Structures are given as structure tokens and as C-alpha cells.
Image (cartoon, rainbow, N blue to C red):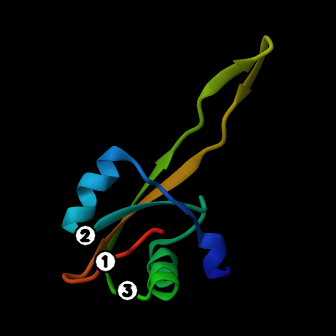
């Protein structure tokens, strides 16, 4: 799997902004990505050292569009903790 396929996008939220001070960054990742793949992708893309990776899988929600029921996609969030002194800058 290509490293650019593993990390879909960074999750920029208010909660995530507070966690950046502790060296934690949130990413939307591919649903079948493993922790070691996420670690390798973040280290190679952003040129930092990763201390820990935590992941969470969120199930899709049932929604209605024009009276037709449907389900949004399942997705996975990764919380990446960097080693002390490391930082990621989002432009």
C-alpha cells in the first residue's frame, strides 16, 4: 500500500488543536490501515519520529436524502503521538 493512500487527510478540529501542544495529531486514515503502516507513512511524509499510534473505527450513520434512506461510510481515525521535540506544521 502506498504511504499516500494510508493517510487520507489531517483532522483539524478544536479538540485536535488542544492536543497538538502534547504532541498528538489526528488523521483520517484508510479503514484497513494497520498501526505500523500509519507510523511509517507519518514518519516518511512529515519527516518526524512517532512514539505511539492509537486508532478508532467509526461506523457510518443512517441518513435520508430525498426520502431515500442510506448509510454514510465507515471511517477510521488515528491519533499519532510524536516523540518529544517533534512537530508537524500544516500550511
Give the Cα separation between the discs numbered 3 and 2: 11 Å
Residue 86 image position (x, y, % from top left): 27, 82
Q: Nearer the viewer, residue 36 or 43?
A: 43
In this rendering, would 33 be left or right of 67? left
In the image, residue 49 sits, relative to residue 68, either above or below, namely below
Which numbered circle lies on residue 76? Answer: none
Q: Which residue is at a point 45% across and 68% down the rendered structure image?
A: 90
Q: Look at mark 1 in the image and give the residue it sits on.
A: 87
Give the Cα separation between the discs numbered 1 and 2: 7 Å
Sort mark 3 into few (<14), some (14-19) or many (20+) by Cα contacts within 10 Å.
Answer: some
Q: Secondary structure at mark 1?
A: loop
Q: Is label 3 in contact with label 1 (beta carbons under 8 Å)? A: yes
Q: Secondary structure at mark 3?
A: loop
Which numbered circle lies on residue 23? Answer: 2
Q: Earlier in the sequence, mark 3 or mark 2?
A: 2
Q: Quadrant of residue 24?
A: bottom left
Sort mark 1 into few (<14), some (14-19) or many (20+) by Cα contacts within 10 Å.
Answer: some
Give the Cα separation between the discs numbered 3 and 1: 7 Å
In this rendering, would 76 be left or right of 24? right
Say which quadrant the N terminus sits in.
Answer: bottom right
Amino acid at each position: 500500500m502506498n504511504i499516500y493512500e494510508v493517510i487520507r487527510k489531517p483532522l483539524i478540529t478544536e479538540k485536535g488543536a488542544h492536543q497538538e501542544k502534547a504532541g498528538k495529531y489526528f488523521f483520517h486514515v484508510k479503514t484497513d490501515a494497520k498501526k505500523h503502516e500509519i507510523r511509517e507513512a507519518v514518519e516518511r511524509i512529515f519527516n518526524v519520529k512517532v512514539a505511539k499510534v492509537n486508532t478508532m473505527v467509526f461506523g457510518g450513520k443512517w441518513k435520508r436524502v430525498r426520502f431515500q434512506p442510506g448509510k454514510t461510510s465507515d471511517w477510521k481515525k488515528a491519533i499519532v503521538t510524536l516523540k518529544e521535540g517533534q512537530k508537524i506544521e500544516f500550511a
